Amino acid sequence: MKKIKEQNLYIPYNLCLKMKDLGFDWVTFDCYWERVKGTGGFGTKHEKIPKILYDQAFAWFREKGLVGIVSTKRINNNGGFEYCALIDDMRLGGKIHYMNSTPSYESSQLNVLNKLIEMCKSDDKTFEFTGETMLHGKVVLNRIRAIVDIPERGVKKGDIGGWIEKETNLFGNAWVYDESKIYGDSKVYDDAEIRGGSEVRDEAKVYGKALIRNKSKIIDHASVFDNAVVTNSEVKYCGRVYGNAVITEESMVGDYAHVHGDAFIEKSSVYGNASVLGKVIVRGSSAIYDRAEVSGRVEVNGRSSVYGNVIISGEIKISDESKIR
């Protein structure tokens, strides 16, 4: 591994100032030189000059869910050395947001830091904690208040929102309303809305223009996104609801099931490795499970079940407690 010069352990002064603008307090972090001007008496002046290590800067960004990495050197196609740099956005489940390669370790870490600052600046904060807290089970939740207008959500500066555990639970133009709650390592972002006493917890994700309302629960590793709507229902484990799908009236999507397209699930369940898509309607305490695939304009009603490895498509009506496998 190439030995790094001592001066290259510290970030440039202009980036120190940018870090301060983002909220990094070098005095609190003890990241400064103290320089004395003057020669004693009233002429003496103390200045705190920032001296931030790259490791300290990267650790600070990690707490915000942005992980910058510079890998060890490797041989490139021309026989020379190069360094690989990347950023994992943990707010989005570890998505690689940026990647490059350069001929030196120093240039790679500088590029990563510049990109981290850019990403953090673009993530404009929309809320603050009000200071009101509550104990929900074993988790302390914080009430939020809007610090800017979010016209897309009908939110005005000063409006009181719902409850979150930590800042990384909510970002973008998303909002949590009334007594709804977001906690654990869950993420709600983009233009999503959480309303009506609903909960998003564990490692669940709600994003796009998804709407969660009326005491719904999105839990475990579940995902709801695009224009999907979940009302008074539950999506759990690794269930995925997306597209223009609507899940309503005490329905459940669980295990590894996918519900998407224009599917409509009412007072029914989809689970296992089942897939429901298109303009399918499932209602009346019916169930789609195992590896069943239902698509097209199929309607499943009246406590009916579709399961096994069956594939159903087209315009078909299944009712009267039928069992299709």
Image: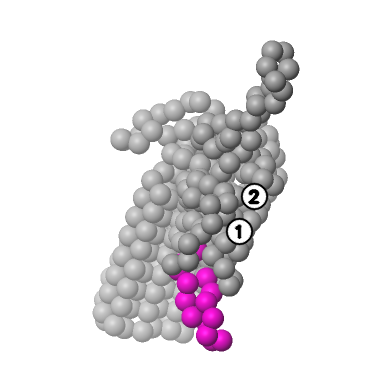
Name the residue at 40% across, 29% down. 134
Q: Position of residue 207 (x, y in %)?
A: 53, 57
Residue occupied by mark 2? 12
Q: Is residue 316 left or right of residue 102?
A: left
Q: Amino acid at mark 1?
A: Leu
Name the residue at 52% across, 70% down. 84
- Report the span colored magenta: 70-83
Q: Position of residue 222 (x, y in %)?
A: 39, 59
* Colour logic: one colour
Name the residue at 59% across, 71% down. 102
Question: 40 and 218: which one is in front?
Answer: 40
Question: 324 and 22: which one is in front?
Answer: 22
Residue sitting farthest toward the front: 39
Q: Position of residue 214 (x, y in %)?
A: 46, 45
Q: Is residue 42 visible?
A: yes
Residue occupied by mark 1? 110
Question: 210 and 85: which one is in front?
Answer: 85
- Quarter of the N terminus within the rendering: bottom left
Instruction: State which tag comes first along the sequence, 2 or 1.
Output: 2
Give the quarter of the image for residue 208.
bottom right
Residue sitting farthest toward the top: 41
